[in-house]
Amino acid sequence: PIGAQQFVPGSATSLDELKTAAAKCEGCELFEPATQTVFGRGGADARVVFVGEQPGDVEDQKGLPFVGPAGRLLRDAVDAAGIDASSVYITNSVKHFRFELRGARRIHQTPGPAHITACRPWLVAEFALLKPEMVIVLGATAAKSLLGPSFRVTRSRGQLMPWPAAAQFPDDFPATQAQALATIHPSAVLRADDRDQAYAGLVADLTVAAQAIG
Ligand code: URA
Ligand code: SF4
């Protein structure tokens, strides 16, 4: 893939500007079969930024991140952890839905390393404008994008980390005061054998982040 960088307006001063530009991104082949780019959602003054994997089927159709079943679960967990939902921005590592057609059904496919790398400039641009205090990394794909290939969510979840040093972002990256915390993806909670326990684990991790920002 050629990557998203050449589609990112270098002079962007608002998230709306980024979103408009991202709608035309052809940085990797995922733009073609998908319905539309699903950009991040939330206010420019958000203190907490959540980073997921990629839009799902529902998100692809509605054009908004985390509006399907995983999104409902995440919203509940955010509330339960005591994070103010109005101070949250939610986005994805990859901004087009990757799927495989089986008959008329669109089956989710995990984005590959090339898609993650191709789409990362949008995340960098979002962070540059948002300057969040806390970055919540949801699951393995977001961890690959932001924390590098050797990071293991299962081993290091629920721990506060300095940001962006951990994320290998550019040296002049503005959000120098931020912290990051990784946890399991809400979709993994939905798939877990013991869903209650998995949900409690997600809420416990998010509570660590909530207490850190006060
Ligand atoms: N899963 C994600 O990672 N992102 C979404 O937007 C929806 C489901
Ligand atoms: Fe561009 Fe990302 Fe969509 Fe690929 S997935 S076309 S890099 S917005």
Image: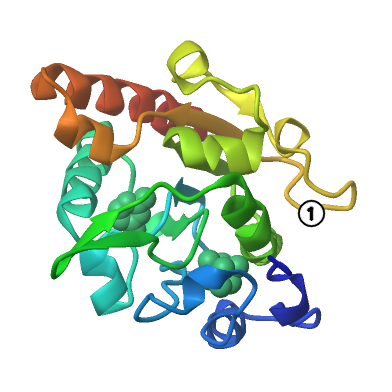
Residue at (38%, 75%) from the top-left corner?
Answer: 34
Question: Quarter holding the C terminus?
Answer: top left
Residue at (30%, 21%) from the top-left corner?
Answer: 204
Q: Is residue 76 left or right of residue 112?
A: left
Residue 45: percent from the left, percent from the top?
A: 53, 64
Q: Is there any visible trace of residue 82 in the rendered image?
A: no
Q: Is there any visible trace of residue 102 in the rendered image?
A: yes
Of 190 and 109, the residue lying toward us: 109
Outermost residue toward the front in this view? 103
Q: Is residue 152 left or right of residue 3?
A: left
- The image quadrant that residue 28 belongs to is bottom right
Outermost residue toward the right in this view? 171
For ligand 1, the image quadrant comes to bottom left
Residue at (51%, 58%) from the top-left corner?
Answer: 94
Outermost residue toward the top in this view? 155
Residue 51: percent from the left, percent from the top?
A: 47, 49
| Vertical position of residue 185 compared to residue 70: above or below | above
Of 116 and 45, the residue lying toward us: 116
- State the residue position of label 1: 174
Q: What kind of element bears circle 1?
A: loop
| Vertical position of residue 61 compared to residue 49: above or below | below
Residue 155: percent from the left, percent from the top?
A: 49, 11
> For the residue carrying disc 1, how many other residues have a C-alpha within 10 Å: few (<14), some (14-19), or many (20+)?
some
Of 210 and 21, the residue lying toward us: 21
Give the image's coloring scheme.
rainbow
Please state which amino acid type lies under the numbered disc 1: Pro
Question: Quarter holding the N terminus?
Answer: bottom right
Residue at (60%, 45%) from the top-left corner?
Answer: 113
Residue 176: percent from the left, percent from the top?
A: 77, 43
Of 177 and 125, the residue lying toward us: 125
| Vertical position of residue 209 compared to residue 63: above or below | above
| Vertical position of residue 68 compared to residue 15: above or below | above
